[in-house]
Amino acid sequence: MRRAIYPGSFDPVTNGHLDIIERGCKLFDEIIIAILVNPDKRPLFTIEERREMLLEVIQTISTGNCRLLVEDFQGLLVHYAVQREADAIVRGIRAVSDYEYELQMALMNRRLEPRIETVFMMPAEVYSYVSSRLVKEVFQLGATIQGLVPPSVEARMSEKLKRG
Ligand SMILES: Nc1ncnc2c1ncn2[C@@H]1O[C@H](COP(=O)(O)OP(=O)(O)OP(=O)(O)O)[C@@H](O)[C@H]1O
Ligand SMILES: [Mg+2]
C-alpha cells in the first residue's frame, strides 16, 4: 500500500491541481489531499469551503483504484506525513520558477525526515500557467476562468465575489 500526501492551499482548487491528482493516482494507492492551515495568509475561502469544493470535484476525475482523502493540517508537513504514515509527498512543478522553491523545500524535508520522498509531477501544458492566485486575480478583474477551474468552483467564486 503506497500512500502519498498532496499538500497545498487549494484556495481554490484548480484544474491544475486536479491534473496532478489524476497523475498521482497512477503511482499511489492512496492520496491524502491536505489543506495547509496557514494563519499568516488571508485566504478567500475558509478551510471548510475548500474542503467542500475538493470533495465535490474529486468525484469528477478518473482515479482508478486510488483512494482520495481530503484533510487539513497545521505545522510541519513532514510531521504530519509521518503521523499519517505516508511514503511520499506529491508536488506539482509548473515552470522553472516553481523549481527553486520546491527543491529547497524537498531537501529540507528530506533532512528532517529521510524516510519520506518528494515526488514531482508535471501538469498538462494547458495548465502550466494556472495558479489559484492568478485565477482569483483575473476573476476579480472580470475575466472568465472557464476551463481553468471546475464549473462548481467557478460558481462558488461568483457567489463569493457577488459576480456572475
Ligand atoms: N497548474 C498547476 N500545475 C502543476 N502543479 C500545480 C498547479 N497549480 C498548483 N500546483 C502545485 O500544487 C501544489 C499546491 O499548490 P498551491 O496550493 O500553492 O496552489 P497554487 O495554485 O500555487 O496556489 P497559490 O497561487 O495560492 O500559491 C504545489 O506543488 C504547486 O506547485
Ligand atoms: Mg503556490
Image: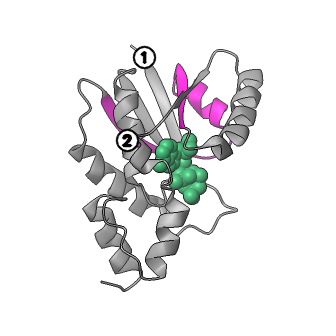
Q: How many marks?
A: 2
Q: Position of residue 71 (x, y in %)?
A: 45, 43
Q: Position of residue 28 (x, y in %)?
A: 39, 21
Q: Amino acid at mark 2?
A: Asp
Which residue is depicted at the point 40% across and 29% down? 24
Q: Amino acid at mark 1?
A: Arg
In the picture of the structure, the residue carrying the numbered disc 2 is 19
Q: CA distance from mark 1 to mark 2?
A: 19 Å
Residue 13 numbered tag = none
Which residue is depicted at the point 77% across and 22% down? 111
Magenta stretch encompasses residue 76: yes
In the picture of the structure, the residue carrying the numbered disc 1 is 2
**To which quarter of the image does residue 22 belong?**
top left
> Where, quadrant-wise, is the C terminus in this rendering?
bottom left
Up the image or down, 6 lies above or below 113; here it is below
Region rendered in magenta = 67-92
The colour style of the image is one colour
Magenta stretch encompasses residue 93: no
Residue 36 visible, this angle: no
